[in-house]
Structure formats: C-alpha cells, structure tokens
C-alpha cells in the first residue's frame, strides 16, 4: 500500500455516530487456492470429495454456533451464511469439479466465482450475498488446506479496523475492546456490516473512497457522525474530539427512559429481535416492547414445515419476555429472495428480490401463512398477550384486506410493512384495511432508489436520508395521523438519532431498532421539543440530497439550542 498524503481526509457514508482514533489494522490475507496443484488422481477423487464435505460441514457448524450466541441481525445473517454452506447447488458444483480431477480448494474457488457472478446478475438482495459467499469460500478453503480460519486480527492495542468489506461472520465476532471503530471501502448504510456495527455501537463509516491506500499502523480518526476518515490527524485535537464524543456517549449510557421529547411527547422505543433469547435481552434494555419479531429464522434451517405447536412454543418465548401490556409486533414470514425455505417449493427466479417473497409466498403456499397465524394465536393464548401481526411485501389493497381478514379471524391485530413504494402511495386506502403500519426503511429505500444496498458506488442512493424516501415516509405518517392509527419505523433509520428527530417530527409514533442503538435515540429525542422535531422535518423535506438534509437538520437543532433562540 502506498502512503496517502499526510492529514488527508477521506469521505464516506456515515453509519454509526461517534469518534475514535487509533492505528489502522487490516484483516489478514485470505487463503488462496493452489491453482498450480496437479490434477487429483481418479482413485483419490472420492477421498478428495470427502475432504471437501468435511470442511464444509465444519464451517457450517461454526457459523451456526456463532449465530446461536449472537443477537439481532448478526444472528440472522450468520444463520443465512451457514445456509449457503449447505446449499445443494453450490455443493454439487464443487463435487462435480472434484469428480473431474480438480483439487478441492480450487473447486471451491471456481464454484464460488460461478455463483457470485450469478448473484451479481440477479442483483437486489442476492447481490448483497456475494460478500457472504466469498467469506464462506475462504473459510472452506482454509479448512481444506488445514490453515487457520481467516478473519479479523486481534490487535495488541485499541485499533481502527479498515477493510474492503466485512462479512457478518467477521463483524459478529469483533472484540470491541480491541477494535474501536470501523471503516470500509465498500458497502452501504443498510449493508450487513453497517447494521451489525450499529448493533455493537462501533463508530463506522462505509463506502470510503481511497481507504485502500492507508497502510497498517497509520493513525486514523473515524468520525461516524460526519462520515469521514482523517489520516494522521493532529493528536491533541483528535484526543479532544474523542473525549467530547466519550462524554456525549456517557450521557447516552446513563439514559434509562422512558422516551419522550423535552416537552413530554411520548415516543415508543421498541426492539428488533429474532428469538426468545434476543427478546429476553431486549427486555433488560431500555426497549418498551418489540417492534419487529423476525419469525423467518425459525424456519430457515428446517427441512419440513414446523407444526403449529412447534411454532407456538417458539413464539411464546418471545411474547413472554415483556409484560402482558407491552407492544409486541410479529412479522409473518419474510422468506424468499436471500432467505429461501427448503419446504416451500419456491421457483427459481431471475430477480428474487422482486419475486416471490414475503406475503406473496402465501399465494402458492396458503397453508404456510394459516399455520403461522394459528401458531401466533396459540402463543398469545398461552402467554395471555395480544400481539400485533404484520405482513411483509404488501403492495395492494387486496393483499392487505385478505391478510387482515385472516388475522382478525384469530383475534389478533393486523398491520402491514411499508417497504414497497406502492404501499406508501396508497397509504390511506391500505390503512383503511389494517390497524397499523410499520415502515421498513431498508427495503423501502432500496426499492425507491432502485439501488443495491451493498453497492459502494450507490451508497449515497441507499441512504434513508434520500429526499424521495423522506417524502414517502412523510406521506405514510400523515395517513396514519389522519386515520388515528399507529405508524412506526423498524428499519435501520430508526437507529439514527438525528434521523429519529425528523421521523418524530413527521408523525412517527414508534421507533424499533437493535437494543444497543436505542439509548442514543432516546437521549437525543429528550433534548428537543416536538416543535423542533417538526421544524427539523420541514427542513429535511425541502432538501435535494442526504448531505443537505443532514446539514439542514443540524442547523435547526443548533438554532434551537442557541441561548438566543
């Protein structure tokens, strides 16, 4: 790596606020397949296949074990990556090559490249899985070669981790005492790396152009609020900024709720969870309930559909984590696309992110939805709770009406996710059929801007501060206010304290995010009154870019905090 200019400042997309300074460290080099190795003799090919399969099973087991002790999205993506390791198509592509004499490590590399190109051509959510796929490749190759498992180094002193990109298996295992900030050259604000960094509370900037020129050991300052990486900063100034950021963080850490603006306007702070363990940990945090229970993780590793009783047992553990009167929102299966169900018989599609996913699965497999709703009903009866139930990928009034009927038949409260632009544009009509909305800003942003969330080149487009996204959120929230029905946000936008001010000003009633992100949101909202939130929202809505929107909101807040105001 060449040395960049002294004290240069690189710009990227801010993801997790905070400031840290330290020496740069890069992940260790990934293993490389030995393409010069001789062809495997015919009599040894069966043993070579067995060597590959044993390696794949070992990697799968490790990923599953890590997913079981991880929280939130980290658990979800680790489980999904483990699912890639067991993909029949990928394994067949590898073993077919070995059967023709290709060494196992080379066969893994070649098959992975074939599938990576397929994923890129499909685009959308599948393109996001390329980083996970290549991480899986490296782990299997290392195991085949008998080498140490690749991953993140453990530095001797608190350091800033730089990378082209980071796979969930890496970010989920970070030692936050040694790795104090993240910056990547690729990725977007809703990529898996960004989401997990936010969950861990690590200052993070993504899509940083020129990051690769920074040598290991170079002192760098990561400003996760401003979205910059400063090279060889003035250390006295850097330490002052770090101290101020730490003091601000201490104020956040001491915040215990409940969440309200400074003039007493209540805002519901809820947690995103995927199982009972995560729900129990969320109940120990400042979260007042659950805004998003991702039920699909209960299904991903199943060869057959779980019975109603099996589902009820899983759901009961989540519902029982909070008091009976707490708000708990259960999302029905958001499967399909990058989260296939082995037993659903989903079609192979040229663009799965725009295909049969979410509620659309119920058209071909109606019993899957009915059985799930029966399981939720049974869990509600067992726990004496009244969960709200919402469907993902709803785009028409008819879909909302049909789903709501099935939910009400079971005595539950129906709602839908707002993640398709059509849902926001028809907010009044669709909200007439259901009792609440939850805006999934990750997918909504991707669909509004027609941009892959993992594309570094398009990172500015996949920013939830995009004016077009804010306009649709405003329209949806206005429809909820007019109808007297709750509209929440459960995408990563809810974890951004500055954006939370705008969302509340737009009329959003609840914010749901990873539990670790909630104190910063609650503390920020407690410093502003509702009028300031509305002024911030108005200022953001008339801007023409994410950077302009952020700057306009900061100006509003600075004016409100001024003694002369």
Image (cartoon, rainbow, N blue to C red):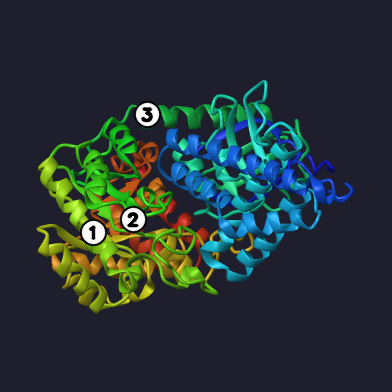
Tell me if label 2 and label 1 are in contact, CB under 8 Å. Answer: yes
Left or right, 288 with respect to 196, comes to left
Query: Disc 1 and disc 3: Cα gap in Å?
Result: 42 Å
User: Looking at the image, which residue sits at the far top?
Assistant: 156
**Vertical placement of residue 136 versus 447, above or below:** above
The disc, 2 or 1, on the residue closer to the chain's N-terminal end is 2
Identify the secondary structure beneath mark 1. Answer: helix
| Mark seen at residue 371 | 1
Query: On the rendered image, what quadrant is the N terminus found in?
Result: top right
Q: Nearer the viewer, residue 528 or 24?
A: 24
Residue at figure coordinates x 67%, y 25% from the top left: 155
* Mark 1 crowdedness (10 Å alpha carbons): few <14, some 14-19, many ≥20: some
Query: Disc 3 and disc 2: Cα gap in Å?
Result: 42 Å
Residue at figure coordinates x 55%, y 62% from the top left: 126
| Mark seen at residue 565 | none
The disc, 1 or 3, on the residue closer to the chain's N-terminal end is 3
Does residue 515 show up? yes
Residue 467: name its quadrant.
bottom left
The disc, 3 or 2, on the residue closer to the chain's N-terminal end is 3
């Amino acid at each position: 790596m060449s040395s960049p200019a002294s004290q240069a400042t690189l710009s990227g997309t801010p993801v997790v606020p905070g400031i840290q300074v330290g020496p740069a460290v890069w992940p260790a080099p990934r293993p490389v397949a030995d393409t010069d190795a001789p062809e495997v003799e015919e009599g040894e090919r069966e043993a070579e296949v067995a060597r590959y399969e044993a390696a794949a099973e070992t990697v799968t087991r490790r990923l599953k074990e890590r997913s079981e002790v991880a929280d939130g999205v980290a658990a979800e993506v680790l489980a999904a990556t483990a699912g890639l390791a067991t993909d029949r198509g990928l394994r067949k592509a590898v073993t077919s090559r070995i059967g023709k004499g290709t060494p196992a490590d080379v066969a893994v590399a070649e098959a992975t490249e074939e599938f990576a190109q397929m994923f890129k051509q499909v685009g959308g959510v599948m393109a996001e899985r390329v980083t996970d796929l290549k991480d899986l490749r490296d782990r299997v190759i290392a195991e085949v070669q008998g080498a140490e498992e690749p991953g993140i180094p453990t530095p001797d002193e608190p350091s800033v981790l730089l990378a082209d990109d980071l796979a969930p298996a890496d970010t989920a295992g970070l030692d936050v005492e040694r790795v104090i900030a993240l910056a990547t050259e690729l990725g977007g604000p809703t990529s898996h790396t960004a989401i997990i960094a936010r969950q861990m509370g690590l200052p993070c900037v993504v899509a940083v152009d020129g990051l690769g020129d920074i040598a290991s050991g170079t002192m760098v300052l990561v400003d996760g609020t401003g979205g910059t990486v400063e090279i060889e900063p003035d250390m006295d100034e850097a330490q002052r900024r770090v101290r101020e950021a730490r003091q601000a963080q201490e104020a956040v850490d001491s915040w215990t709720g409940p969440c309200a603006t400074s003039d007493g306007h209540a805002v519901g702070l809820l947690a995103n969870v995927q199982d009972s363990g995560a729900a129990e940990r969320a109940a120990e945090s400042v979260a007042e309930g659950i805004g998003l229970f991702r039920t699909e993780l209960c299904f991903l590793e199943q060869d057959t559909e779980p019975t109603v009783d099996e589902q009820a047992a899983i759901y009961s553990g989540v519902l029982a984590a909070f008091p009976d009167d707490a708000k708990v929102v259960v999302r029905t299966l958001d499967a399909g696309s990058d989260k296939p169900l082995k037993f659903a018989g989903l079609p192979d599609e040229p663009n799965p992110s725009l295909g049969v996913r979410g509620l659309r699965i119920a058209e071909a497999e109606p019993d899957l939805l009915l059985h799930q709703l029966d399981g939720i009903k049974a869990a509600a009866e067992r726990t004496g709770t009244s969960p709200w139930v919402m469907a993902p990928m709803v785009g028409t009034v008819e879909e909302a009406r049909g789903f709501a009927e099935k939910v009400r038949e079971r005595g539950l409260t129906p709602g839908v996710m707002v993640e398709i632009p059509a849902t926001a544009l028809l907010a009044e009509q669709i909200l007439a059929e259901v009792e609440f909305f939850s805006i999934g800003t990750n997918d909504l942003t991707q669909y509004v801007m027609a941009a892959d969330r993992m594309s570094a080149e398009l990172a500015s487009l996949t920013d939830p501060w995009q004016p077009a996204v804010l306009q649709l959120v405003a329209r949806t929230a206005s429809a909820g206010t007019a109808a007297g029905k709750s509209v929440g946000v459960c995408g990563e936008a809810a974890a951004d304290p500055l954006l939370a001010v705008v969302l509340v000003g737009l009329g959003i009633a609840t914010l749901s995010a990873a539990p670790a992100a909630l104190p910063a949101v609650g503390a920020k909202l407690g410093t502003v009154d509702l009028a300031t939130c509305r002024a911030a929202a108005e200022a953001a809505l008339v801007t023409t870019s994410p950077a302009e929107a952020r700057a306009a909101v900061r100006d509003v807040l600075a004016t409100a905090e001024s003694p002369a105001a």
